[in-house]
Amino acid sequence: MDSPLNRVWENNPELIRSYYDRLPIHERLCEEVKYILEKKIKSSGIQIGHLTSRAKTLESFCEKIERKAYDNPLQEITDLSGVRVVFLYVSDKEKLEQLVNEEFEIHEIVDKLGDKGVEEFGYGAFHYIVSLREQHAGARYDDLKGVRCEIQIRTILQDAWAIVDHHLSYKHEEDIPKQLKRKLHALSGLFEAADDQFERIYHARIQYQNNVKNSISVDAKSSLENDINLDNLLGYMAWRFPDRNTSSIEAAADLLSELNQFGYKKLSSIDDVIKKAWDAVSASERKYPPQEPDDEEPGQYVGVGLIRSALAFVDENYRLSKNEGVFLARVNEFLSLVK
């Protein structure tokens, strides 16, 4: 069967062998770049949909060789290693750009959206060609020095458009039938407009949480009588625990499900639990602080952890639902401190 792979094999079998010789290096580089990005993104607070990596397949390698003229494909093709960051909000793009610039040696930046004309078809993203910085030294990195990796940065909707675009298979404007061109331009415009609306909803949500926090500060008695929803729960935690890191939306959503399960319907009911259990929560945290696997020093609980700890001290049904021996023993150790 005739294919790019078969044709390259027939014309240059040594190139195929060299690809396989280099493949473990590119797989390791993918893992290293992905690890660095995962760690830095987690500490930056940037919200992402997913982070993936891949070494270019042999089939894709051969197909690219046939599409473009290379003197030395293994040196000139810059996306043999690839990592993709799909993030949620357009406003985080600058943070991601800064993160990539700080962590890697940048060789090239391609703006797939900015490079298109106003009338051109498509909805792009940012591609960086990078290598590891010199501080990554030692035997682990010797084979990776100077090897290049492509980092793609896309919003979720840019990623969705890329999938649609791939299945449409229109590489150039002139490939599109005239009767479809207007509809496809409108569709790509809808994706871009949706990105903008998604960003507006995000900022409106943050503003709502800040309003909740401020209203509690002004009139706690009245404001805490509101029924709990996800966003006023986040606003409440920002008010009650101003010196703690912000809880993730996912963790807050899980907590909200637990609160509903155990009958906590108003913010005031949570606040009463916190007040009763605070001395016990504080003493327990001092003796048994949370420890992240990658952190050398013990940490502190965020708001979700503090509320769960307080519930365990005050609410026997909640406490027993955990059914964990070590957890229950630690709660019992400080139960006398509950007011």
Image (cartoon, grey):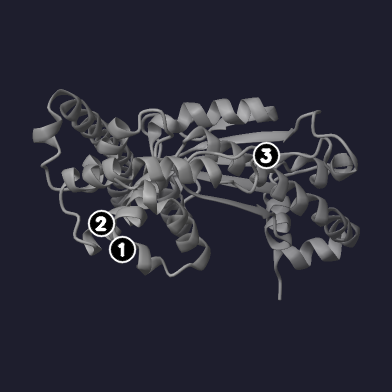
Q: Which mark is residue 32?
A: none
Work out whether residue 205 or residue 251 is closer to the camera in this orientation and state it: 251
Dot 3: within a 10 Å radius of its alpha carbon, few (fewer than 14), some, or many (20 or more) residues? few
- Name the side, left or right, on which 179 lies relative to 282: left
Residue located beneath label 3 in the image: 296
Q: Residue at x 59, y 44 (%)?
A: 38
Q: Extreme front residue here?
A: 336
Q: Amino acid at mark 2?
A: Leu
- Estimate the x, y position of residue 197 in percent, counting from the top left: 26, 37
**Location of residue 134 (image quadrant):** top right
- Estimate the x, y position of residue 271 in percent, counting from the top left: 23, 42
State if disc 2 and disc 1 touch (CB < 8 Å). no
Work out whether residue 260 or residue 173 is closer to the camera in this orientation and state it: 260
Alpha-carbon span between mark 3 and mark 2: 33 Å
Residue located beneath label 1 in the image: 316
Which numbered disc, 3 or 1, marks the residue that appears first in the sequence?
A: 3
Relative to residue 171, is residue 207 depicted above or below?
A: above
Is there any visible trace of residue 80 in the rendered image?
Answer: no
Q: Amino acid at mark 1?
A: Glu
Which numbered disc, 1 or 2, marks the residue that appears first in the sequence?
A: 2
Q: Extreme bottom residue here?
A: 1
Dot 2: within a 10 Å radius of its alpha carbon, few (fewer than 14), some, or many (20 or more) residues? many
Which SS class for mark 3? loop
Relative to residue 162, is residue 286 depicted above or below?
A: above
Q: Residue at x 67, y 35 (%)?
A: 129
Which SS class for mark 1? helix
Residue located beneath label 2 in the image: 259
